[in-house]
Image (cartoon, rainbow, N blue to C red):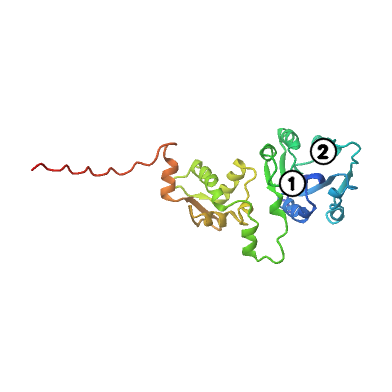
Amino acid sequence: MSLIPARSPRLAVLIDADNASAKIADGLFEEIAKIGEASVRRIYGDFASSRSKAWADQLARHAIIPQQQFAYTTGKNASDITLVIDAMDLLHSGRFDGFCLVSSDSDFTRLAARIREQGIDVYGFGEQKTPESFRQACRRFIYTENLLPPAVTESLDDAATTSALKKPSAAVPLIRRVLSEMESPDGWVHLGILGTELVNRYPDFDPRSYGFRKLSDLVRKTGAYEVQPGPGNSMLVRLLPQRAAAAAAPAGKAAPKAAKPAAAKPQRS
């Protein structure tokens, strides 16, 4: 048995400086480190412009290689074209297990789809305004608002509330839909498996978007599910009984109501 640990997946990180804020740099590479090793780190833009200049301070800090593209013609984005060319070169090198595309630009939708056609995972990073086409083209999509450092003056509880992009109640139908389709004799499902299925179905699903660091905290907060400890350190979750019955009912049909007693007819004198 080899004592050498398996190497983390090799990732190519390609950043569109024109469509990504430099404020996310620390959080971005912390998030990428959870996925694998950022073997290639490149950023594309015109660093002579004020829009991309903010990234200059982050280059040495995170060992990012800048790819300078001067804006020779107004309205033509040479940075995007260079990024796509480099991505295809890296893809055909066969050296990478995944790509991290950092941009909110829908122009990279086809690039993400093409890389995935090759059997390589694509992780997208962009703002909440990112078009759905690009989000869905990625294996997983992470909102960069969730990567911003919390304000120093905020407490942990306040940060969980103020940084939420969506209300916790917005997650209820997504979780319910996935839970109702997962087969289980008693309705209990491992929380880890539920999390995996949620990301498979909704690439941009992230508990942090609802103000919580963990899926377990989000599930508890909604009050729509039962949670209990499982084997080892695992957790189990299932729909509340009344909600499970409603989910199992045919679409468009309400649960049957109890019949009202017939009103007594007045007697004739």
Say if 40 sits above or below 85 in the image.
Answer: below
Question: Where residue 54 is drawn, which disc sits there?
Answer: none
For marks 1 and 2, give the one nearer the viewer. 2
**Do we see residue 161 in this rendering?**
yes
Please state if 156 lies on the left or on the right of 59 as rendered: left
Amino acid at pointer 1? Pro
Residue that label 1 marks: 9
Q: CA distance from mark 1 to mark 2?
A: 25 Å
Quarter of the figure with residue 30: bottom right
Can you say which quadrant of the picture contains the C terminus? top left
Query: Secondary structure under badge 1?
Result: loop
Q: Toward the viewer: 165 or 232?
A: 165
Could you tell me which residue is drawn at 18 percent across and 44 percent down? 264
Residue 111 % position (x, y): 76, 35
For label 2, the residue is 80
Q: Of label 1 and label 2, which has the lower sequence position?
A: 1
Circle 2: residue type:
Asp
Provide residue 87's location: percent of width, then percent of height: 81, 38
Question: In the orientation shown, which residue stands out farthest toward the left?
Answer: 269
